[in-house]
Image (tube, helix red, strand yellow):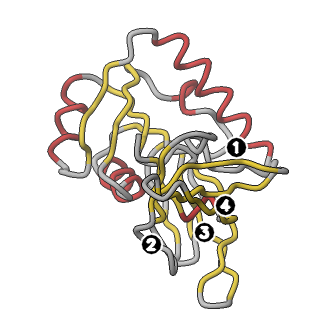
Amino acid sequence: MIGLGGDWDRDGRVLQERPAARVCPVDTLAGEWWLVHTKSRHEKALADDLGRKGIGYYLPLVQLERRYGGRSVRVQMPMFPSYLFLCGGDEERYVTLMTHRAAKVIRVVDQERLKTELRHVHRVMMSEEPVNLYPSIKPGRRCRVVRGGLAGLEGVVLRRRGTYRIYVGIDALGQSAELEIDPALIEVLD
């Protein structure tokens, strides 16, 4: 999502093209940029709220293919889960917090660096190159399976031969097991 507003259907397809989709919001929106930590899975809803209120934001989305019940579905997922970039001042910050979809709004001290990084993200988004969304899933981090038959299972992330695996052990027994897992099914605990 870029700029102000826009609509998607249930499968993540764009119903209405965003007005400035090819122009980086950093170059079109005036104001200070803030980092908004959203409540879990509230990124798109917050973006819609801000768009309706005329507040500038940037929510980079990537299109992914997921399998549900044996069928393949294309979905739009935030590039940075639980985060959205807000453009404005203290009043926009307050309005954002009052939506009750934001956990906190973080002031960004180095505005120029953030703007440069947002331009880079925008270039990646416009390139239409495939993007994988597993930024915090690194070997050695504790994680929990959030969906599927193993939901609730906790372990440690491993990566072997290009695939993600989860290590599950019983320390008292000195025994362990590991299994291959789709990174989309796990969340980092640390």
Cβ–Cβ below 8 Å for labels 1 and 4?
A: no
Question: Where is residue 121 shown, x and y percent of the image?
Answer: 65, 33
Identity of the amino acid at label 4?
Gln
Crowding at dot 3, Cα within 10 Å, few <14 / some 14-19 / many 20+, comes out as some
The residue beneath circle 1 is: 125
* Distance from Cα at disc 1 to Cα at disc 3: 15 Å
Question: Where is residue 179 shown, x and y percent of the image?
Answer: 66, 65
The residue beneath circle 2 is: 151
Q: Give the mark nearest the N terminus, 4 or 3.
A: 4
| Figure check: 127 above or below 74 | above
Q: Quadrant of the C terminus?
A: top left
Q: Give the mark nearest the N terminus, 1 or 3.
A: 3
Residue toward you, 187 or 173: 173
Q: Residue at x 74, y 43 (%)?
A: 126
Cβ–Cβ below 8 Å for labels 4 and 3?
A: yes
Q: Residue at x 61, y 22 (%)?
A: 117
Cβ–Cβ below 8 Å for labels 1 and 3?
A: no
- Judged by depth in the image, the label closer to the viewer, 4 or 2, is 2
Identity of the amino acid at label 3?
Val
* Distance from Cα at disc 1 to Cα at disc 4: 10 Å
| Figure check: 6 above or below 81 | below
The residue beneath circle 3 is: 75
Identity of the amino acid at label 1?
Met
Q: Give the mark nearest the N terminus, 3 or 2.
A: 3
Question: Where is residue 72 shown, x and y percent of the image?
Answer: 70, 82
Mark 4 residue element: strand
* Distance from Cα at disc 4 to Cα at disc 3: 6 Å
